[in-house]
Amino acid sequence: MNQYDIFISYSRIDSQLAAKIQEILQKAGFKCFRDVSIHTGDAFMETLANSIIESRVFLLLGSSHAYKSRYTRKEIKYAFDKNKLILPYLIDDTNLPKGLEFLLSDLNKRCMKEYPINSLIQELKDIIPHSTTTTPTPSRPPFIEGKPVTFSVNGISFNMMPVNAGKFIMGSKEKNNGYPAHEVRLLKNYYIGETEVTQALWQTVMGNNPSTFKKHDLPVEQVSWNDCQLFIAKLNKITKCHFRLPTEAEWEFAARGGNHFQGDNYAGSSEVWNVAWYNGNSQQCTHPVKLKVPNELGIYDMSGNVNEWCFDLYGNYSDTPRIDPHGAKSGEFRVIRGGSWYESEVKCRIYIRNRANPSIKSANLGLRLTLSYGS
């Protein structure tokens, strides 16, 4: 349970404006933490760290003073490492310094001059569930173990396919970027999207379509990892579920067909053209989901079409067995998997890894949803 809705990160020189923004947000119903909340005698840095973890959103009040502040930069780095949802709100015209631009460049859009506080409040309300008014909880589809689950958002339906827990050899014995192969055990059943998230679903949740190749049944692309977190937060508010990005291990296990793996290099076949849109057959564009053959679990396009963001920070594999791995503990890049219409058949192999800065957007990069059982 989160103790706070919003952690406010700012420079002490901007204290007066930070206090005013906090007051406005609290009047709008948000529970905010700012470092003036730390009581005398409390361990300052420990309290800051715990408060970042216990907040739903990390709100950075960006300014020339904040970017120079050693403490503010530490807070940003800690929030990034802890996978917090970071929303920069720029209170002056200073450009982000290179180090922060690398992490947050695609989020550099909320400038106080053009984006009034009321717009920020509405965005936060879309992300953070509130109980200020009593509304009936929408009915959720029944979770029947081992059966697909269908969700519908404003008439747009999508299926989540069951993946039973199991043990597998993750990675590759060949010395490529999937090396070394190592045993992984996933202890819990989960669901993964039958298809990549389509433009139709993204449009109905977010109210926009950033994709280069536009059509309702094409996979959404031109979405960063950070964009995906905003999308998932809004989808969760609508559905009252806890969708998320898959871990890299969950992604590869599902791509291999789970416990029904047949030893194929691609998700559902030993022949790439059977299951994937890649640079040998794509005609340099994405294609509607579900046109190729599904894998053993009934999942489409886990090889090719668009690369897919995973939850994990990218790190090198070790050859030791792992249980429910969640990636590296720190790092700058997020894992992407699956290959795409733009890449060779090698990149579409189920064990091949890739990585990208979480702010990167590309016409060959989208997402697929995951859901824990009963959530």
Image: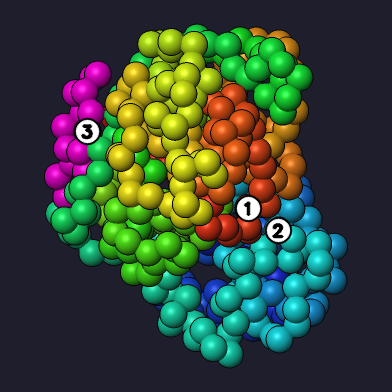
209 relative position to 10: left or right: left
Q: How crowded is mark 1: few (under 14 residues within 10 Å), some or many (20 or more)?
A: many
Distance from Cα at disc 2 to Cα at disc 1: 7 Å
Q: Which amino acid does label 1 sit on?
A: Pro
Quick one: 9 or 160, which is closer to the camera?
160
Q: Where is residue 295 in the image (x, y as percent from the top left)?
A: 36, 24
Q: In this rendering, would 247 be left or right of 99?
A: left
- Mark positioned earlier in the residue sequence (2 or 1): 2
The x, y position of residue 369, in whole percent, is 40, 41
Pointer 1 residue? 358
Q: Quadrant of the N terminus?
A: top left
Residue 50 visible, this angle: no
- Name the residue tied to disc 2: 103
In space, the residues marked 3 and 1 are separated at their CA atoms by 29 Å
* Above or below 293: residue 75: below
Query: Does the residue at mark 2 contact the one at mark 1 (Cβ under 8 Å)?
Result: yes
Residue at coordinates 48% horizontally, 29% vertically from top-left?
Answer: 272
Name the residue type under label 3: Val
Viewer-proximal residue among 354 and 52: 354
Label 2, residues with CA under 10 Å away: few <14, some 14-19, many ≥20: many
- Expressed as whole percent of the image width and height from the top left, the position of residue 198 reads 34, 52
Q: Residue at x 21, y 48 (%)?
A: 157
Q: What stretch is highlighted in magenta?
A: 138-151
Per the picture, the main secondary structure of the magenta-coloured stretch is loop
Q: Name the residue under label 3.
A: 149
